């Protein structure tokens, strides 16, 4: 349990550190270029992990439609997130991204993936009210970039729902490789 707690804290700290670096980079680097550079480093890193774990023989699983659909959603997550982080304070963006579980609950109810009972609906409305307090639609701090952050949170929820449909026979490293390739290629398209 202690190792799990430490891993979660360290992971959260690394995400914040990454956000700070991305925010600094967006001041001088276009979004497309940032996606390509991040993608190339990630592709090299994940290929090393795939080789070390002996999963190179399963690389064809990256071409499965469900894996590519997830990767497409992750590209949209990155695109909206990086665009938003360039313009919003990190605290506001992080707070808006906390709407992801709320959005996922709504999607689960709408698409009948799970039954959402009254206490969960009350939690959704309460949580959504908190997001509205942070984003303050109609206020001076609300911009189109707040909507970009909300779009990113929505695609995170969609991505996670798609991930549930990926067979356990597909190694997670292959899913990550597909995601990073899509993000890098998407950056090339945006840059062009």
Image (cartoon, helix red, strand yellow):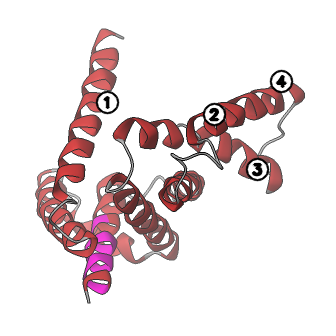
| Magenta span includes 188 | yes
Q: State whether residue 106 is above or below residue 158.
A: above
Determine whether the residue tagged by mark 3 lies in a helix, strand or loop: loop
Label 1 sits on residue: 12
Choose mark 1 or mark 2, whichever is in front: 2
Q: Which of marks 1 and 2 is nearer the N terminus?
A: 1
Mark 4 is surrounded, within 10 Å at the Cα level, by few (under 14), some (14 to 19) or many (20 or more) other residues, namely: few
Q: Which of marks 3 and 2 is nearer the N terminus?
A: 3
Q: In this view, does 51 lie to the left or right of 192?
A: left
Q: Which of 149 and 187 is in front in this view?
A: 149
Determine whether the residue tagged by mark 4 lies in a helix, strand or loop: helix
Examine the image and state in which quarter residue 158 appears.
Answer: bottom right
Stretch of the chain drawn in magenta = 180-189
Q: Could you tell me which residue is drawn at 28 percent across and 31 percent down?
A: 11
Choose mark 1 or mark 3, whichever is in front: 1
Choose mark 3 or mark 2, whichever is in front: 2
Determine whether the residue tagged by mark 1 lies in a helix, strand or loop: helix
- C-alpha distance separating marks 3 and 4: 17 Å
Q: State whether residue 17 is above or below residue 26.
A: above
Label 4 sits on residue: 119
Label 2 sits on residue: 133
Q: Earlier in the sequence, mark 3 or mark 4?
A: 3
- C-alpha distance separating marks 3 and 2: 29 Å
Examine the image and state in which quarter residue 182 appears.
Answer: bottom left
Q: Contact, CB < 8 Å: mark 3 with mark 2?
A: no
Locate the C terminus by quadrant: bottom left
């Amino acid at each position: 349990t202690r190792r799990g707690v430490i891993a979660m804290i360290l992971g959260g700290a690394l995400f914040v550190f990454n956000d700070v670096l991305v925010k600094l980079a967006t001041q001088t680097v276009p979004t497309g270029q940032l996606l390509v550079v991040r993608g190339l480093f990630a592709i090299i890193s994940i290929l090393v992990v795939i080789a070390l774990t002996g999963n190179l023989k399963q690389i064809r699983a990256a071409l499965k439609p469900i894996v590519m659909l997830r990767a497409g959603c992750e590209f949209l997550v990155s695109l909206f997130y990086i665009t938003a982080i360039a313009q919003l304070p990190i605290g506001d963006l992080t707070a808006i991204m906390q709407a992801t579980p709320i959005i996922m609950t709504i999607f689960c109810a709408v698409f009948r993936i799970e039954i959402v009972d009254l206490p969960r609906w009350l939690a959704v409305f309460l949580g959504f009210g908190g997001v509205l307090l942070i984003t303050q639609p109609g206020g001076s701090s609300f911009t189109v970039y707040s909507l970009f952050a909300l779009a990113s949170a929505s695609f995170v929820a969609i991505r996670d729902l798609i991930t549930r449909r990926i067979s356990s026979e597909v190694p997670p490293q292959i899913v990550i490789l597909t995601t990073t390739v899509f993000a890098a290629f998407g950056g090339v398209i945006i840059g062009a």
